Image (cartoon, grey):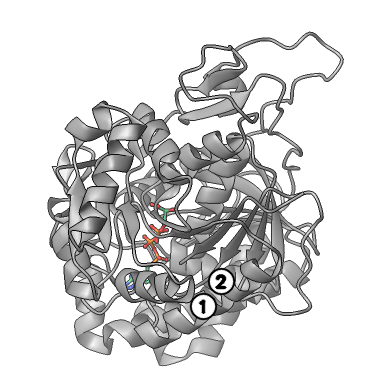
Amino acid sequence: MAVRLGVIADDFTGATDIAGFLVANGLRTVQLTGVPTAATSVPEDVDAVVVSLKSRSNPAPEAVEMSLAALGFLQSIGAERFYFKYCSTFDSTDQGNIGPVTDALLAALGTDFTVICPALPVNGRTVYKGYLFVGDAPLHESGMRHHPITPMTDSNLMRLMDRQSQGRTGNVDAAVVARGSAAVRDALAALKAEGFRYAVLDAVTDDDLDVLGEAVADLPLVTGGSGLGAGLARVLSRPAGQHADDATGTWQHADDATGTWQHADHDTRTWQPTPGRTVILSGSCSVMTNQQVAAYDASGAPTLRVDVDRLLADPPTYARDVLAWALERSGEGAAPLVYATAPPDEVARLHATYGAERTSEAIEALFATVAARLAEDGVRRFVVAGGETSGSVTTALGVTGFEVGPQIAPGVPWVRALDSGIELALKSGNFGDTDFFTTAQQPAPQPAQQTAPQPAPQTAEQTAPQTAH
Ligand SMILES: Nc1ncnc2c1ncn2[C@@H]1O[C@H](COP(=O)(O)OP(=O)(O)O)[C@@H](O)[C@H]1O
Ligand SMILES: O=C(O)[C@@H](O)C(=O)COP(=O)(O)O
């Protein structure tokens, strides 16, 4: 069985995000962590392989090198097409890494045209006339303008891409998308003929992503968020000869909350998370994570705010103190939360005092050390908030790959380490609703009995314990 889709994701939460949507939309998926080596093995019967990199905020040459190594691996296992997954809020700077990585992947694949589509409507990310919106606000007015590493101060994807890439960027606008996949394919061909190298695709609804998935399925390289990944998965997992508008009834909109479709006889919930000693580590400073931390603290659960000044004064001693605090509380009851999460004025103060890079590195190293020691002491489940933070924690836990489980919230599936069985929920900064940390600890919904008649279609309650914020 061929690997239909090889995904290169630029951070770990982004990788679990797209892996969750691929599974929910019918592709058997394995998620690998870090640049795979010759020794990395992939199960025989997978449709998609997702490589999780931590390359989003590295210097561009490093990000390119990692991405090309991932591409080489995916080519070596015979992947038929490739997907570069970046953030639905297009997290990047004028130096990259989205532009340089896209250019390098195009060159390596011997092709000169691709699409750009960060849209994820189920989580409020939409693209209209090439402008990216987060909920009701354009990207540059959203909380992303204060991001500690990649502050986003422009919402125009053509301009953003032009500033960090070698080629020119055009737009396939919503009016064309509304006319269907053939019209989109024509528009892409016209842009390519005019010398554009990238086309930003408008997408406002999940139906748009179906049209776009169909339109881009033959491109050697597609780039975007998990929304277009889901649209593409729906095309790739469809029985041969069936088209999106065939009213066969075999495909059902499984869950309006998570925006997933599934084949009528496809049970995506292959395993269920097991309750056990859990610790929550939060390094995201997003608006939503700030709210989630505040709500968890208000619920009476044990919480510890990282004192970054103390951390930077004596990292080893501070890590020991944090570890002792978390260990003491990781038995019964609500899981302890350790958080560096802070509002923009505190982040600005720390950056002014210590520098942004030193601050980020110290906080990520703290979470990595604490997670590794907690695992040694028998903690089996981690809920981690933040993409960079998740990369540091997962790497410190020595996880080489994941099986993907049920979604806690759109874009946040449970994942289970292939080697150690440790379970993780890697939450993108802005995903989940206010009660996410509590919801994640609630028992997962039971899978449908295989022997019982299959109810159709499934409800949101059966497939996801909460709705999108
Ligand atoms: N209080 C803080 N001040 C400055 N930087 C912080 C603070 N807390 C966390 N960080 C850093 O901010 C970055 C957040 O990035 P990330 O984990 O990817 O979150 P998100 O998913 O919201 O982007 C990390 O490098 C983290 O270490
Ligand atoms: O596409 C998304 O929004 C996420 O999958 C993502 O990339 C997560 O990044 P962080 O917000 O840095 O966690």
Quadrant location of the C terminus in the rendered image: top left
Q: Are marks 1 and 2 in contact (CB under 8 Å)?
A: yes
* Residue 61 % position (x, y): 39, 87
SS at badge 1: helix
Q: Nearer the viewer, residue 381 or 377?
A: 381
Q: Is residue 125 visible?
A: no
State the residue at coordinates (38%, 30%). Answer: 206
The amino acid on which the numbered mark 2 sits, given as a three-letter code, is: Leu
State the residue at coordinates (69%, 71%). Answer: 76
Q: Residue furthest front?
A: 193
* Residue 342 % position (x, y): 31, 63
The amino acid on which the numbered mark 1 sits, given as a three-letter code, is: Leu
Q: Ligand 1, what quadrant? A: bottom left
Tag 1 residue: 68
* Residue 357 % position (x, y): 33, 85
Q: Is residue 375 above or below residue 357?
A: above
Q: Residue furthest right?
A: 451
Tag 2 residue: 71
State the residue at coordinates (30%, 71%). Answer: 99
In the image, the residue with mark 2 has its CB under 8 Å from the nearest atom of ligand 2:
no
Q: Nearer the viewer, residue 53 or 331?
A: 53
Q: Nearer the viewer, residue 360 or 261?
A: 261
